[in-house]
Image (cartoon, rainbow, N blue to C red):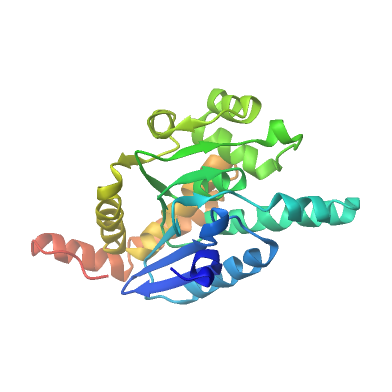
């Protein structure tokens, strides 16, 4: 591998059929995210949202880690003033929240360690499939950092109060079996079966009704935040009852074939 390939650069987007894959791409630095990567991720998310042919997104890392999180040097450099500190903190938070709100279902393929802010990036995905060798830790308490509000909320709503306290307040490292036990991982598999399991789930999601999934994902996220738009959810339900997706779904069921959405 050349030095350029080892060093890498901005996140890479790969599209194959109905599946998009975003690969964090700084393997020499364990895919540590830098300021310029945040704008690139936002642009990639926008591109995925604008393409109706894309039905599922997989987020993963290059090399032996998923991501070492956000570059601490960038945080330190920006923390010169209150204004810059807020800007630095919110920029990463905006990216993670944007990922959580993507209309297409998202899978985080955890090929290796997930540390710091990238633990929240992965948690913003709908599913997290990890190799049985992965590990994670959230070092905020060790660094003297009060984490941003939406990230703490995501930990609490996804993992529960006790697990959020354990991860944030102790800053201790946990391995894949514990990550699975507390619900951080959706599934854990040996590394040699990681792609097979991700492909299986991606294929399943890509074959389901995209508008129905988009609407239900939005409702589930809103429920988790305690901010459900009831009128909008009811309207989506009513619209689905007379939409093209349900017509095709019922027809396919009666004809004993996979639906074609």
Residue at far front of view: 2
Q: Is residue 122 above or below residue 21?
A: above
- Is residue 84 rendered to the left or right of residue 209? right
Along the viewing direction, whichever of 35 and 183 lies nearer the viewer? 35
Percent x, y of residue 60: 44, 57
Residue at 53% from the left image edge and 71% from the top image edge: 4
| Vertical side of 80 occupied by 243: above or below | below
Quadrant of the image containing the N terminus:
bottom left
| Residue 231 coordinates in the image, percent (x, y) | 54, 53
Residue farthest left in this picture: 256
Residue 186: give x, y in percent of width and height.
37, 41
Number of callouts in the render? 0
Along the line of sight, the residue nearer the viewer: 131 or 97 = 131
**Snapshot quadrant of residue 147:** top right
In percent of the image, x 11 and y 64: which residue is there? 257
- Looking at the image, which residue is at 33% across and 60% down? 241
Q: Is residue 114 left or right of residue 176?
A: right
Q: Quadrant of residue 202?
A: bottom left
Foreground pick, 66 / 226: 66
Residue depicted at 60% across the width and 49% down the height: 69
- Measuring from the top left, give residue 260's x and y in whole percent: 22, 70
- Residue 228 in sight in this render: no
Q: Is residue 238 visible?
A: yes
Camera-nearest residue between 227 and 76: 76
Tell me the quadrant of the picture where the C terminus can be found.
bottom left
């Amino acid at each position: 591998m050349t030095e350029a390939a080892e060093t890498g650069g901005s996140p890479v987007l790969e599209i194959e059929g109905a599946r998009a894959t975003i690969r964090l791409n700084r393997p020499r630095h364990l895919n540590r995210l830098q300021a310029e990567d945040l704008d690139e991720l936002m642009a990639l998310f926008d591109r995925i949202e604008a393409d109706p042919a894309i039905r599922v997104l997989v987020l993963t890392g290059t090399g032996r880690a998923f991501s070492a999180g956000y570059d601490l040097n960038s945080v330190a450099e920006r923390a010169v003033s209150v204004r810059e500190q807020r800007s630095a903190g919110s920029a990463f938070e905006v990216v993670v929240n944007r990922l959580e709100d993507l209309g297409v279902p998202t899978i985080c393929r955890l090929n290796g360690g997930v540390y710091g802010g990238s633990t929240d990036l992965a948690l913003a995905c709908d599913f997290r499939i990890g190799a049985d060798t992965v590990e994670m830790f959230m070092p905020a308490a060790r660094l003297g950092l009060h984490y941003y509000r939406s990230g703490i909320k995501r930990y609490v709503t996804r993992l529960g109060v006790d697990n959020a306290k354990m991860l944030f307040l102790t800053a201790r490292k946990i391995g894949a079996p514990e990550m699975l036990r507390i619900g951080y991982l959706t599934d854990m598999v040996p590394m040699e079966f990681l792609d097979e399991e991700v492909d299986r789930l991606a294929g399943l999601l890509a074959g389901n009704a995209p508008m129905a999934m988009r609407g239900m994902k939005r409702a589930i996220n809103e429920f988790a935040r305690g901010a459900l738009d009831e009128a909008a959810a009811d309207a989506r339900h009513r619209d689905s009852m007379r939409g093209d997706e349900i017509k095709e779904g019922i027809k396919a069921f009666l004809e004993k074939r996979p639906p074609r959405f």
